[in-house]
Image (cartoon, grey):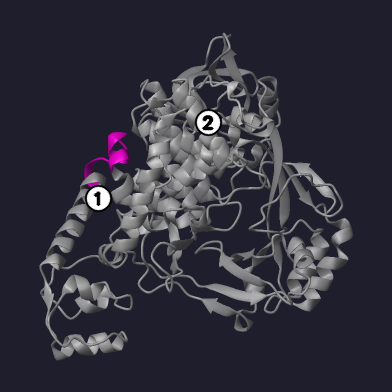
Amino acid sequence: MKQALEEFDVIVIGAGHAGCEAALATARSGFQTGLFTINLDTIARMPCNPSIGGIGKGHLVKEIDALGGEMALAIDATGIQFRRLNTRKGPAVQASRAQADRLVYHKYMRSALENQPDLHLRQAMVLELALENDALAGVICFPNAFYRSRCVINTAGTFLNGLIHIGLEQFPAGRDGEFAATRLSDSYRQLGFEIGRLKTGTPPRIAGNSIDFAQLTPQPGDDPPLPFSFMTDKLELEQVPCYLTQTTAETHRIISSGLDRSPLYSGIIVGIGPRYCPSIETKIIQFPDKESHQVFLEPEGRFTTEYYANGISTSLPFDIQIAMVRSIPGLEHAELTRPGYAIEYDFFQPTQLKPTLETKRLANLFHAGQINGTSGYEEAAAQGLIAALNAIRNLHKGEPFVLRRDQAYCAVMIDDLCSRGVLEPYRMFTSRAEYRLLLREDNADERLADYGREFGLLQGERWLKLESRREQIGQEKERIEHTVLAPDQQVNECLRQMQSAPLTEAQPLRKVIARPEIEYARLRELKPDWPALAPGLIKTVESDIKYEGYIKRQREQAIKLQDLEKIMIPDDMDYNTVHGLTREIRQRLTEIGPRTLAQAARISGVTPAALSILMIFLKTHGRSGHV
């Protein structure tokens, strides 16, 4: 191997949302980190909708914040509209979402990276992994430069052999206007990795001064807006509205007329697209009886008139896109600033990863983000952070950092990926988690902050703030336990307004809060002598009290599952020696190589009977260990 131009502890490939979190985490832990990106001017770019959060996704952002990541702080600093979703449903599925000023978000994140000690940004295209004596030694960059590193975290996203489609035209690109990484996949093929193809896409962008907003339904932000980060006390900003419109029968006719030139329906695109975010072409074909589809117009920023037309992602020819958009109410005179497009890219089946996100074939090589078959900024950022924490553990020669499914949404996602693999781009939903009441947005700090502290990511003011939050929650719960609410006129009138039965005698405050219809924040307004609390703290306390029984039950279920998590399966397990397993199950277990019996139970196709056989074998032959 030639002389290295530079040496790092960690090299991160790609400066999207996964790469930013990974690089910041390793540098904050004191490791010399090189962040390699094809273009420094597109760090943390938002090629799809300019927003952060959503159902399931907002939970991930809160967890990133609780572990000491940057995404929540970034959106609080650069958001232009904040909304809470599912507020009429239970706290487990309530989530935060914010519109970002996409250019300002990029500038914020670039500044965070550039000003982070021990983090070094390099504009370079990684061509291949560098090996010495069959061990990872770093990366080779264009034109033929060797950079040495002890660990590599690959977050290349859609850049691996990225191919953009607009109608029947196609061209290599990682995102529109950026080079694709065309050689890195070959390096992986030579190492024997399984590579697949996925597809995602974007809608056209529209000039705001060509939109007739009078025909649209405005969607304002919440008042007051609630922040993402536990560090942010409150948000003071003028919020920018989004707008709703919908497709029409004429829209669907125009789309149908262009299907013969659609790369999706002419066999040109071979990658599998996201089922939960289909193109508008797919929508009208799969739902022919649906008269219209919602179009959500999202501002790209505070200082631009450009809008993102969420809901009409497409790869149709540009002339069809123009006609399609102009058939939508309010967009009759729309000017398209950029066409929508589909992009195909290479990904690596995540069953080739350990639960640490380290590859099984090559030690100290980690994958995070769309390279693992996921979609979304939030999913990528969470993986980047977890991969970095495990790289840190590797460098310290410590134990793997693997969270349980009852501890975090990021653990649910990573376990799904490593145990089941993907057939389509993976997206986080609250429905994927068995223990949703344990994994609320508001208690992410209680679940994860100690880990962030352990890794050195939560220090100084940031840690003190989280400690103060915990202390205030504990004090408020203690006060509630010893408070009795008297049945005075003011209290009963408040209860009536919340359609709750008035008090006829004094009752413990906890019992009143436990009523489903009670909003504790409104009750507190009657008692100015009670200690002041931030809205987020009040909601956390209220949820813990209202759902105490359900939370207890889910904790008990999680503890039962932990018994299976403690039964370890050896890395060198030969499933061919386990009599009674079908050939298909043996192949699946061998392919994935579960760490524990619990992970084996979550693998598609592994039956309860097979699990019993495996458990008996491990106990009989003394092959199991306990953590």
The residue sitting at 64% across, 42% down in the picture is 158
Q: Quadrant of residue 488?
A: bottom left
- What element does badge 2 sit on? helix
Identify the amino acid type marked 2.
Answer: Leu
Mark 2 and mark 1 in contact? Answer it, CB < 8 Å. no
Mark nearest the camera among 2 and 1 is 2
**Residue 246, above or below 279:** below
Tally the marks: 2
User: Could you say where residue 287 lies in the image, as x and y percent from the top left?
Assistant: 75, 68
User: Could you say where residue 204 lies in the image, as x and y percent from the top left?
Assistant: 69, 61
Identify the amino acid type marked 1.
Answer: Leu
Locate the N terminus and report the quarter of the image it occupies.
top right
The one of 324 and 56 positioned closer to us in this rendering: 56
Image position of 474 (left or right of 74): left
| Residue of label 2 | 614
- What element does badge 1 sit on? helix
User: Would residue 382 be counted in the magenta stretch?
Assistant: no
Disc sitting over residue 466 in the figure? 1
The one of 63 and 226 positioned closer to us in this rendering: 63
**Image: magenta residue range:** 450-461
Q: Quadrant of residue 247?
A: bottom right
Structural distance between the alpha carbons of marks 2 and 1: 43 Å
User: Could you say where residue 323 lies in the image, as x and y percent from the top left?
Assistant: 80, 70
User: Would residue 452 be counted in the magenta stretch?
Assistant: yes
The residue sitting at 36% across, 61% down in the picture is 227
**Residue 188, above or below 260:** above
User: Could you say where residue 330 lies in the image, as x and y percent from the top left?
Assistant: 67, 78
